[in-house]
Amino acid sequence: MAHKKDNRKVKRVPVGYDLLYKVDGQPEVHLKYGRCTSMFDLSEGGMAIYTERPLAVGTELDITFHVIFKDRQSPPMEAKGRVAYCAPLPKEKTYRLGVEFTHILPKDREEITSLVKTKPTF
């Protein structure tokens, strides 16, 4: 069986973190529900998240989240991102968004890099 090549520039790791994001300054809290979690995967370049409503490609987001290690949790991280794709998940009645970071503090990017190095990737 042939494996599909992953053309990503950075490695991503599976996660199950809650997060808060804002669209146009209006908060939308997305917490764990059912078998899905809000953040599906994370990399130095962005994340995939589940939402209950679609967002247009190009939508700008303000995102607040934590990175959780075995022995500690990071302080809150704040990033700006842009929706790169929005895919419906009809079975779950949700949407999966690919979000590319457009701005994140260097110290927060370093924390994500540390996480990526310690967790198995896809």
Image: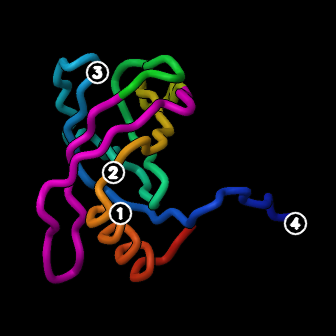
Identified at 34% across, 24% down, the residue is: 52
The quarter of the displayed image where residue 105 is located: bottom left
Q: From the image, tell me which residue sits under label 3.
A: 23
Which residue corresponds to mark 1? 109
- Cα–Cα span, label 2 and label 4: 39 Å
- Is 18 left or right of 104, judged from the image as shown? left
User: Which image quarter: residue 2?
Assistant: bottom right
Q: Specify few, some or many for label 4: CA neighbours under 10 Å numbering under 14, 14-19, or 20 or more.
A: few
- Say what amino acid the circle numbered 3 marks: Val
At label 2, which amino acid type do we have? Answer: Ile
Label 2 or label 3, whichever comes before in sequence order = 3
Q: Which residue is mark 4?
A: 1
Residue closer to the observer: 75 or 105: 105
Coordinates of residue 70 in the picture (x, y in percent)? 22, 81
Answer with mark 1 or mark 3, whichever residue precedes in sequence. 3
Residue 102, relative to residue 110: is it above or below?
Answer: above
Mark 3–mark 4 distance (CA, rounded to whole Å):
41 Å
Residue 29 lies left or right of residue 59; in this view the side is left
Q: Which residue is mark 2?
A: 104
CA distance separating discs 2 and 3: 17 Å
Q: Amino acid at mark 1?
A: Arg
